Image: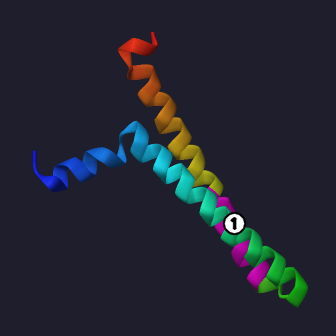
Amino acid sequence: MSRIEKAKGFKHSRPGLWLSIGTSAFGAVTIAKDVKKARTENDTLKLINALVGAAALITGTALLVRELRQLGDDDVLLG
């Protein structure tokens, strides 16, 4: 198995999914800062941009959690 194949496999492994969820948590901090800044500047367009980014982050995280659960369902040891 080549390094590229291993890297692609890692993305869909349990540790890879947890890493992706953790990365999303850092993205949430950035979005929270953007929302706060947009509110203090009273900038509606920046606020909408931050909220759309938050929706994308939530959706992406939900997809990762679903994939993580599906991995658990396929695991023979988990029953």
Residue topped by disc 1: 29
- Region in magenta: 46-57
The amino acid at mark 1 is Val
Q: Nearer the viewer, residue 31 or 3?
A: 3
Residue at 75% x, 69% y: name it.
32
**Residue 77 visible in image:** yes
Considering only vertical position in the picture, is 70 above or below 31?
Answer: above
Instruction: Examine the structure image and report whether residue 50 is included in the region drawn in magenta.
Output: yes
Residue at 61% x, 65% y: name it.
27
Figure quadrant of the N terminus = top left
The secondary element bearing badge 1 is classed as: helix
Instruction: Examine the structure image and report whether residue 60 is included in the region drawn in magenta.
Output: no
Its colouring scheme is rainbow
Residue at 41% x, 37% y: name it.
14
Count how many numbered circles sit on residues in the image.
Answer: 1
Q: Position of residue 18 (x, y in %)?
A: 49, 44
**Residue 42 visible in image:** no
